[in-house]
Image: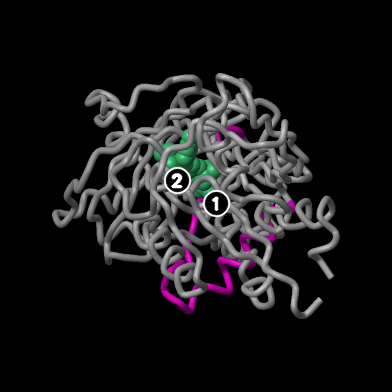
């Protein structure tokens, strides 16, 4: 009803997924319907923390393997980002994808998502392993600008931010209280958060080089014939002017967050082979980076679940202790986005919202 009290929602995690879910929840009438608190160990201002993935992403919309569910999220997110181009937060990005096999077009399931798609005549300067290619327009963002922007949007909608590491899901349940909702957007944290403990969650290490390269204005990537550890790409950013990110590596189950110099040299030499514009004398390195993509066997988990929280017992944290034996909380899980958290963010957030409404129909009317 009109006078209903707002539903308390505690979102654990302040990466792109937790922030985007908060944004979708508080849109329009949602701002009155939900009272959202975000609790996270790492917040959008902690841009140098390697304990979360979001600061380290490319981040662009870049084709991945086909999957019906992900395709839906990726299309929805592409369209959303495309509409945001006039804000300056999102760059309309001329793009080239090269393949190590002859028939590029047969690999391309995403040509109706991106814009201005066409098959490319391969250029003379390309390495001999490039056999075919396509060009199109996609989008990119700069996480260092986009994440703080999301946070400021949410603060203007009275979303509260608390910097804290939680040990167990129960703590979030207790904070949400009776009738509340918990959103679990903890990325790799879902592996160790008590009450979730999802051992299907694993890291994919990504090392990158950020440079000022004002002449490199296209996204370029090579899709190898055989999938491996090495990922070659260059992604220009909307701002600051001339900034590009080069990758990289795709090292499954590697938790090492230190920079490897030999890897950095490999990234640069491969990028130069594809992007002659890097030879421009104005090009200079700005930083070397490592991030861990929060992946999950079987793909991302986005689903709602009623969880019964224990409130008694020696192992139950003090914060969660209560008079009843247990408490019931609605938990919406949203983690395991691996290499594609940005490009799935708006679609996945809409899905999280739908699954919340299915299990909590009283708040949807
Ligand atoms: P995270 O950003 O890891 O956030 C997790 C949040 O949960 C953090 O706030 C953390 O502090 C919090 N948390 C965890 N455990 C706890 C706890 N116990 N208590 C409290 N808080 C907790 N994606 C794209 O779409 N396009 C790209 O081009 C792209 N390029 C990438 C390049 C690299 C090198 C890397 C590393 C990643 C790239 N990604 C890209 C992937 C993207 O970065 C991730 O998919 C995305 O950031 C995941 O967001 P998330 O919110 O799920 O997790």
The verdict on label 2 being within 8 Å of ligand 1 is yes
Work out which residue is located at the far front of the displayed protein and give it: 323
- Looking at the image, is 53 positioned above or below residue 212? above
Report which quarter residue 131 is drawn in.
top right
Report which quarter residue 1 is drawn in.
bottom right
In the rendered image, residue 162, in percent from the top left (x then y), is placed at 42, 52
- Looking at the image, is 201 positioned above or below residue 35? above
Question: Is residue 88 located in the magenta-colored stretch of the structure?
Answer: yes
At a point 22% along the width and 55% down the height, the residue shown is 212
Name the foreground residue: 47 vs 62.
47
Residue pointed to by mark 2: 40
Q: Please give the range of residues in magenta.
A: 72-101
Residue pointed to by mark 1: 18
Q: Which label belongs to residue 246?
A: none
In the rendered image, residue 150, in percent from the top left (x then y), is placed at 46, 64
Q: Residues within 10 Å of mark 2 (few under 14, many from 20)?
A: many
Q: Are marks 2 and 1 in contact (CB under 8 Å)?
A: yes
Q: Residues within 10 Å of mark 1 (few under 14, many from 20)?
A: many
- Looking at the image, is 51 positioned above or below residue 287? above
Q: Left or right: 271 with respect to 285?
A: right
Find numbered disc 1 in the image and state the secondary structure of the residue it sits on: helix
The verdict on label 1 being within 8 Å of ligand 1 is yes
At a point 24% along the width and 30% down the height, the residue shown is 265
At a point 54% along the width and 45% down the height, the residue shown is 12
Q: What colour scheme has been applied to the protein in the rendered image? A: one colour
Name the foreground residue: 99 vs 137.
137
The number of numbered discs placed on residues in the rendered structure image is: 2
- Can residue 180 be spotted in the picture? yes
Please state, as top left, top right, bottom left or bottom right, where the C terminus lies in the image: bottom right
Indicate which disc, 2 or 1, sits on the residue closer to the N terminus.
1
In the rendered image, residue 293, in percent from the top left (x then y), is placed at 48, 35
């Amino acid at each position: 009803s009109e006078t209903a009290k707002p539903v308390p929602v505690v979102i654990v995690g302040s990466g792109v997924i937790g922030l985007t879910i908060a944004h979708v929840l508080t849109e329009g009438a949602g701002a009155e319907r939900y009272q959202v608190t975000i609790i996270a160990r790492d917040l959008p201002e902690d841009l140098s923390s390697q304990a979360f993935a979001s600061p380290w992403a490319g981040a662009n919309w870049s084709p991945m393997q086909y999957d019906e569910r992900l395709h839906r999220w990726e299309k929805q997110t592409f369209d959303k980002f495309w509409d945001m181009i006039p804000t300056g937060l999102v760059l309309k990005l001329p793009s080239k994808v090269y393949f190590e096999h002859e028939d590029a077009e047969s690999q391309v399931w995403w040509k109706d998502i991106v814009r201005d798609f066409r098959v490319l005549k391969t250029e003379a300067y390309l390495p001999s392993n490039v056999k075919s290619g396509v060009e199109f327009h996609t989008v990119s963002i700069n996480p260092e600008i986009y994440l703080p922007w999301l946070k400021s949007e949410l603060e203007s909608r009275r979303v509260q931010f608390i910097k804290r590491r939680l040990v167990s899901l129960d703590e979030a349940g207790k904070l949400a209280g009776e009738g509340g909702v918990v959103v679990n957007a903890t990325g790799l944290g879902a592996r160790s958060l008590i009450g979730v403990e999802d051992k299907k969650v694993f890291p994919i290490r990504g090392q990158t080089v950020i440079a000022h390269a004002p002449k490199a204005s296209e996204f370029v990537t090579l899709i190898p014939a055989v999938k491996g550890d090495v990922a070659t790409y260059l992604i220009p950013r909307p701002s600051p002017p001339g900034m590009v990110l080069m990758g990289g590596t795709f090292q499954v189950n590697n938790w090492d967050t230190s920079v490897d110099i030999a890897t950095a040299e490999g990234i640069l030499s491969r990028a130069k082979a594809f992007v002659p514009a890097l030879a421009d004398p104005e090009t200079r390195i700005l930083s070397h980076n490592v991030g861990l993509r929060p992946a999950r066997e079987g793909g991302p988990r986005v689903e709602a679940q009623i969880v019964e929280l224990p409130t008694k017992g020696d192992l139950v944290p003090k914060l969660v202790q209560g008079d009843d034996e247990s408490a019931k909380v609605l938990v919406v899980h949203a983690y395991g986005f691996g290499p594609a958290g940005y490009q799935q963010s708006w679609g996945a957030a809409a899905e999280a919202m739908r699954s919340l409404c299915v299990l909590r129909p009283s708040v949807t009317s």
